[in-house]
Image (cartoon, rainbow, N blue to C red):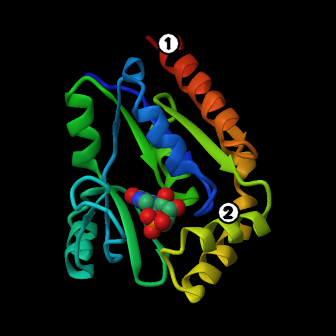
Amino acid sequence: MQKGKLLVFSAPSGSGKTTIVRHLLAQPELNLEFSVSCTTRALRGEEVNGKDYYFISIEEFKKHIKAEDFVEWEEVYRDNFYGTLKSEVERIWAMGKNVIFDIDVAGGLRIKKKFPEETLAVFVKPPSVDELKRRLKERSTESDDKINMRIAKAHVELATAPQFDKIIKNYDLDEAKKEAYQLVKEFISISE
Ligand code: 5GP
C-alpha cells in the first residue's frame, strides 16, 4: 500500500490540541484526514459517533485488543480506554491522504516508534497547569473529579515533551495554529 504521512498531535487534555488539529484539517492543501479513535468513554456534548470517535463498549474494546486490531491503545483514564485501529490508518492511506492523530502522549510516542520514518510527533504545551485547569473548567464538559484526574495526569504528560520531534507552545492560539501549519507543511513537502 502507498504510505502517507502520520501527523501526531499529543498534549495534556485542555492544551488546545483539538482546536489546532481541526484548524489543520480545514487546510485542503495538507491533504489530511482525521484518525477516528475507538473509546469506551461516554459521548460528550455535540460529539458524533464515527466522526469524533467510535464509541464502543469495554467488551468490544477488549475483543479488539485480543484480535490485535490496534496500532496502539491506552487506558488513558481509569476504565476509559482509547485506541487507534490499524484499519483506520489503512483506510486513510488507501485514500491517498495523510493521517492526523489527536491522541494522548503515550499513544503518540508509540506511533512514532512503530512508524519512525512516516511520523512527525508534535507536543502541544499549555502555558501552565493552572491555565489548563482554567480551560477545562471553562469548557465545563466534565465534573470536578474528572477535571482533577486530567490535571493529575497533565503533570506526568508534560515531562514527556522532550521525547517529541517538535514542541509548540500554545500561549496564543493563532500563533500556535500558524506554527503547526508550518511544521506540517514542511514535513509533508520534504517527503514528497
Ligand atoms: P477526550 O476524552 O478528552 O476526548 O480524550 C482524552 C485523551 O485521550 C486525549 O488526550 C486524547 O487525545 C486521547 N486519545 C484520543 N484517542 C486516542 C487514541 O486512540 N489513543 C490514545 N492513546 N489516546 C487517545
Q: Nearer the viewer, residue 130 or 12?
A: 130
Q: 29 above or below 41?
A: above
Q: Is residue 175 left or right of residue 95?
A: right
Residue at left offset 72%, top offset 54%: 126
Q: Is residue 5 left or right of residue 184?
A: left
Residue at which label 2 appears: 157
Q: Secondary structure at mark 1?
A: helix
Quadrant of residue 45 within the rendered picture: bottom left
Q: 67 above or below 127?
A: below
Q: 154 above or below 175?
A: below
Residue at left offset 63%, top offset 56%: 15
The amino acid marked with disc number 1 is Ser
Query: Where is residue 54 shown, x and y percent of the image?
Result: 24, 62
Disc nearer the start of the sequence (2/1) = 2
Quadrant, the N terminus = top left
Q: Is mark 1 within 8 Å of ligand 1?
A: no
The amino acid marked with disc number 2 is Glu
Contact? badges 2 and 1 (CB < 8 Å): no
Quadrant, the C terminus = top left
Query: Where is residue 121 shown, x and y percent of the image?
Result: 57, 40
Q: Which mark is residue 69?
A: none
Q: Secondary structure at mark 2?
A: helix
Q: Is residue 28 left or right of residue 14?
A: left
Query: Where is residue 84 shown, x and y percent of the image?
Result: 34, 55
Residue at which label 1 appears: 189
Inter-mark Cα distance, 2 to 1? 30 Å
Quadrant of residue 149 within the rendered picture: bottom right
Quadrant of residue 180 within the rendered picture: top right
